[in-house]
Image (tube, helix red, strand yellow):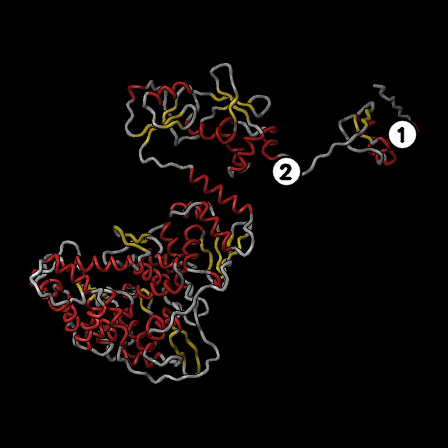
Amino acid sequence: MESDRVAWAEAVRAALSRYDDSLLRSVAARLFKPRNQWPADELVARSVATLSNTPVIDRRLRELPPSSRHLVAAVGLSRNSSWSVGQLVAVLATIGHSEGLAPLLVLLDAGLAFPVLPDGTNVIRQWEDWLGSRPTAARVFIPPPVADRATRDGLPLPQLSGKAFEAKVIHAADGLEWPLRLGVLWQQLRAAPVRLTQASALFKRDLTRLQADPILGTSPVDLAVDVPEAGVLAMGMGMAAGLFVAEAGELRTGRFPPEWDTGLLPTIAGLWAALPGIAHWDPLRGYFLTEEGEPFPTVALPALLLLAAQPDGVWTHPADVAEYLISRHPSWPAALRGGVDDAENWVEAMLLGWALPSRLVEATEDGEGWWVRLTGVGRHLLAGGPAPDLRPPFPQCLVVQPNGDVVAYRQGLTPGLIASLSRFADWKGLGPACTLGLTAESVYRGLESGLTLADIAVVLQQHSAHAVPANVLDLVRRWAGKRERITVHTSATLLEFGSPGDLEAAVVRGLVAQKLTDRIGLADGDVEYRHFRLLGNRDYSARPQQCVTFDRDGVTFTVDVSASDLLLEAELSRVAEPVESDGTERRYRITPESARAVREQAMTLSEFEQWCLNRSGEPLSASARLLFTGSGGVLGEVRHRLVLTLPSEAVTDGVCQWPQTGDLLDDRLGPCAVAVSEENAAELLRRLAAVGVDVRADRG
C-alpha cells in the first residue's frame, strides 16, 4: 500500500537525519556505494530510494552472513517491521544463531536496519550511543521491501518427527474469535477506559473487571481447552494492533484497523503482525508480569516458523516443538513455573489457545494427545502458500427482531461487519449465533463514532436475511434524531425574557447569540449584565415549581410567569401548543396533535401524569388522559336504541331484575332509565302492563 511505503520511508529519513555525518557516510557507502562526496540530504534521499531498488537489495542480502540474513527473514515472516533488540536476539538464538547483537549490528552498518529513535534523541556517532545502558529495550525496524525479499529463501529449520494421518475430528476456527472479542472490549473501553500503570500494566480493579466479564471470560468457540485471561489477551492484541491507545495513564479506544474493511485474510494478517506487541499474557498463567521481558512473542514466532518448515499436511506434536525451542531460547526456560517440564504444556496452550482461534493452526487429538499443523491461512502467511478465499458464503447473516435484539450468524460475519455492529449495537453473547441489542445508548455511541443514521440503516438492511421490522428502524431514527438535535456548548448562559419582543431586541443588539424559544436566548462567553434588568433567578437543583393552572376543560392551562423556569419552556414544547391570549398571561392547550407528539417522544403515561402533578399540583385530568390514551384499543359502538324512563329507581331495579322483562332490556342508562331495542319494545310494554306498569309513549 502507498501509505505503508510512505510510512517506512519517513521512518528511514527520520533515523538517518540523526546519524553523525561520518556514520551516515559509512552506512551509505555499504548500501549504495556513492561515487561522489554528496551532501547529507542527498545521501539520505538516495538511501531511501535504494531501499526500493529490488536488484540492489537482493545483492546486499546475499552479502550478509547467514545469521543476519535469517534475522531479516524472520522479521519479514512476522509481517511486523519493528521489534525490540531483546526480542530479536531471543528469536535469533531460538532459530539457531547465538551471536548476540552481532547480526543486528551488521544490518545497521549495512543500512538494512534502522533504530527507532524517540523524540529528543541526540546525534548518533556510534551504535552504543543509541543502545545505551539497556540495549535490549531499544527498538529497531527493518524496511518492508528488505524484509519481504529476505523471506524468499526461508529459514533453515529442521523437520520434526511428525506424522501424516487421516484425522477423525479436526478442530479449526473461522478466524473471527479475536475480532469479535476486540469488538466487545472496544465497547467496554468506550464506556469506561482502563487505567494503566507506568509499565502499561493493569491495576487490580481493572484486571478483576476483565476477569469477571461474562463474554470476555469465556473460552473460544469449539475449543476443548480453556484460555486463561482471554480478556487480557484480547486487550494486548488490541493495543498491539492500534485499536486501543494508551493516553495519560488510561487505555482508550482508537479507530478499527482499515484492513478490517478489506476482508478476513488481511485482518488475520494484521493480528498476526501485532504479535511483538502482546505483553503481560502467558498461555498457562494468563495475566503475567515479568521484569526480564515478555517471552510470549519470542516463543510464539519461532514455534509457528518451525511448523511452517514441516511438510504440508503433516501433523506435529507440541512436545516436539517444545523440545526444539527449550534448548535454544535464552530466557523462556527461566520464565516457566515448572521449568522444562512445563514447556510442552506452554506450547500446547499457546497453539490451541491463541494460534488456533487466530486461524493460523488447526488441531486434532488421538491417543498421544494433541497434534497441530498450519492452516491454509498459516501457510500463506508463513510459508508462501497461496492466499485462501475467505469470503463468507452468504452476506445476509443478521436477523433483526421487533424488540431490537439482533442475531448474527458467524458464517456470514466479516471483520468489517463486526466493527460496524460494535459501534452501534451491544454485544450480548458470542457463539455460532452471536446476539446483540439495539438501544438508545448504543445508537448514540455509533453516531459519536462517526456513523450516520443512513450508515446504521444500510448495515441492518444489507445484511439482514429478512426485512428489518419497521418499528426498529423507526426507533433507531427517533434515537438518532434526538442526538442530532443536541448541541454542546462548553460555556454559555441562558437568558429568559418577558416577551418575544424583548428577546428579538436582544438578538438585534448582539447580546444573544441564538434563540432557543420565543422567550429564551443563549449567550456565549461572558455576559454583560449591565444591558439587562434582572428580575429573578431560579434554583434548578430544587423541586420543580408549581406554576401551571388548568381550566375546567382539563386541557387548557395558564402559566404563572413569575414562578416558571427555563426548564418549563422545554417541557411545554413537548406537551402542549400555545393559545392566543388578549392579556399578558401565557396560555397553552393539550391537543390530540400534542398528545401524539408526547407519545412519539417516548414519554410514558406515568411520566405525563408526573409532569402534571409537579407543575400544577393536580393529577392528570380525564380529558387529557383521553387525548393521550384514547380508549386503550377497545372499540366503541353507535346504535339506534329506545330509552325507557320508569317512575322510580325501585321500579327500575325490579324491571331489570325480573327475568320476564330483564331479558328484553339492553344497557341501564341511569337510576330510572334503560335502553331497549326497537324489536323488543312492543313485547316489553305488554309484559309491563301485565304487572301494572303503564308506559306512555313520547310523541315528540
Q: Which mark is residue 99?
A: none
Considering only vertical position in the picture, is 549 above or below 179?
A: above
Q: Amino acid at mark 2?
A: Gly
Q: Would residue 349 be visible to someone looking at this image?
A: no
Q: Residue at x 46, y 46 (%)?
A: 454
Q: Is the Cβ of the residue at disc 1 closer than 8 Å to that at disc 2?
A: no
Tell me the distance, in whole angstroms, between the alpha carbons under discs 1 and 2: 37 Å
The residue under label 1 is 682
Q: How many badges with numbers are in the image?
A: 2
The residue under label 2 is 632
Q: Left or right: 219 with respect to 689? A: left
Q: Left or right: 214 with respect to 126? A: right
Which numbered disc flags the more N-terminal residue, 1 or 2?
2
Q: Residues within 10 Å of mark 1 (few under 14, many from 20)?
A: few
Secondary structure state at the residue bearing disc 1: helix
Q: Left or right: 578 with respect to 211? A: right
Q: Residue at x 16, y 62 (%)?
A: 47
Q: Position of residue 268 (x, y in %)?
A: 37, 65
Residue 326, picture quadrant: bottom left
